[in-house]
Image (cartoon, rainbow, N blue to C red):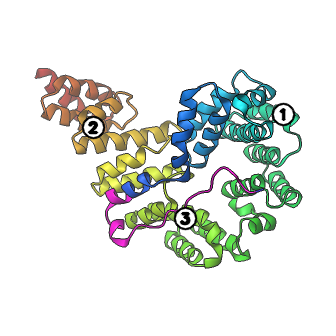
Amino acid sequence: MKCALLSVLLLLAAPAAAQDNPEQVLENIFTAQHECDRLMTQLDAAVDANPTWVKPRLDRAECLYRVGRYEWVIDDLEVVFNGRSIKQTLSAATAGGVPEEIARVSVENGAVVRIIMLLDQGQTQPAKSMYSAAKKVFGDSPAMARADIAIDAATGNNRSAWKSVDAGLARWPDEHQLEQAAREMTSRDPRGVTEAADAVLNAPANTVGWYNDAVSAYTSGSYSECLQTVDMALAEPSIAADHERFLKIGYTCAVTTSDLQRTNQFIVQMGGVAGLRSDAVVRHAELLYKNESYAAALELLRHVTPGDDTQRAAVETLQVRSLTRKGDLDEALTIAQSNHASASALANLALALKNVGRTDDAKAVLEPACLRMQGSDATRCYDFLANLNRG
């Protein structure tokens, strides 16, 4: 049974002339419509009309998950599942005359997505508890097999997860949930891809070898070799269904070599940043900033969810620097107030504020920045602060 809800639109690369203009590249990416975008208006309207209606929220959550808008997925699934058992959720999903067999599919799919999201957040025990509760209702199903595989992988048991992928593919051939499990495991553990998983993902035998070669070249620092391997794979017509993982590793290699044009080309072909490593996307934004493409850098950063404080500091530093260069000092000041951006970025913002006569705002930004500096940088910072205090 193939997926009945959505299919991903592949966005073709923009013409060569547009590739040289980062602002145009980013505009093309983030204004392109995914199939979910066309459904979202209807789903939003249904939820707005009756916020307690479970079925539209579940469908919207799955839609959002497929396009990588994970923070909104969490919001919808929290509303649906918090305070309800799986059986109560299933009963609620039949409201409005929804047939039970249709409601059952939506609730089961929603439960699997929530389990995966909990695992991604490091909440292993709540994920396991939800899996146990869901399996009591849905039994030994393809969706529950996918959830079980995700739990094994998240707890470091890749060997068991791959065995379950192979067993599931043999038991439920052409089942979308097992195809998704194979794709998710391939993303987690590209070196462990099994023959059965490779076959169901429509890749010829040498695709796994090419991908492993690209990953090996990247990890050894041979970025040009990585890109050559990716180009070889993408030129092979028979692996069209498996392009996504080559585009992702190609993007990572291109951004690491500071090749802005190639990086832009890869992201256009992927149609956005969903599923990309956050550190690679931040690096892309840095390249755009250095290219003085400040609006494009800010647009890209808007789609990054920092994974930790270090990444948050990198994102907010780039945001403050880009906004300062654009002259959007109010927005830069708002971000600066969290004090995650680098001290030098805050000092530059303080100088820009001082130059337009906003001395009080400049002092408010500079004081915490000086505390984080050392040596000669701290001396210059406190001298600047003293000048501001003297007016």
User: Bounds of the magenta span?
Assistant: 2-25
Residue, disc 2: 377
Q: Amino acid at mark 1?
A: Ser
Q: Are marks 1 and 3 in contact (CB under 8 Å)?
A: no
Q: Nearer the viewer, residue 267 or 173?
A: 173
In the picture, measured across the screen, residue 309 lies left or right of residue 161, that is left
Kindly identify which numbered label has been placed on residue 197: none
Q: Amino acid at mark 3?
A: Leu
Q: Residues within 10 Å of mark 2 (few under 14, many from 20)?
A: some
Classify 272 as above or below 74. Answer: below
Measured as percent of width and height from the top left, residue 306 is found at 50, 40
Classify 169 as above or below 350. Answer: below
Residue, disc 1: 132
In the picture, measured across the screen, residue 290 lies left or right of residue 89, that is left
Front: mark 2 or 3: 3
Q: Amino acid at mark 2?
A: Asp
Measured as percent of width and height from the top left, residue 269 is found at 49, 64
- Name which residue lies at 42% across and 55% down: 284
On the rendered image, what quadrant is the C terminus found in?
top left
Q: Is residue 307 visible?
A: no
Secondary structure beneath dot 1 equals helix
User: How many angstroms separate mark 1 from mark 2 (CA)?
Assistant: 56 Å
User: How many angstroms separate mark 2 from mark 3 (CA)?
Assistant: 42 Å
Secondary structure beneath dot 2 equals helix
Residue, disc 3: 247
- Name which residue lies at 58% across and 69% down: 217
Q: Quadrant for residue 176, please give it.
A: bottom right
Secondary structure beneath dot 3 equals helix
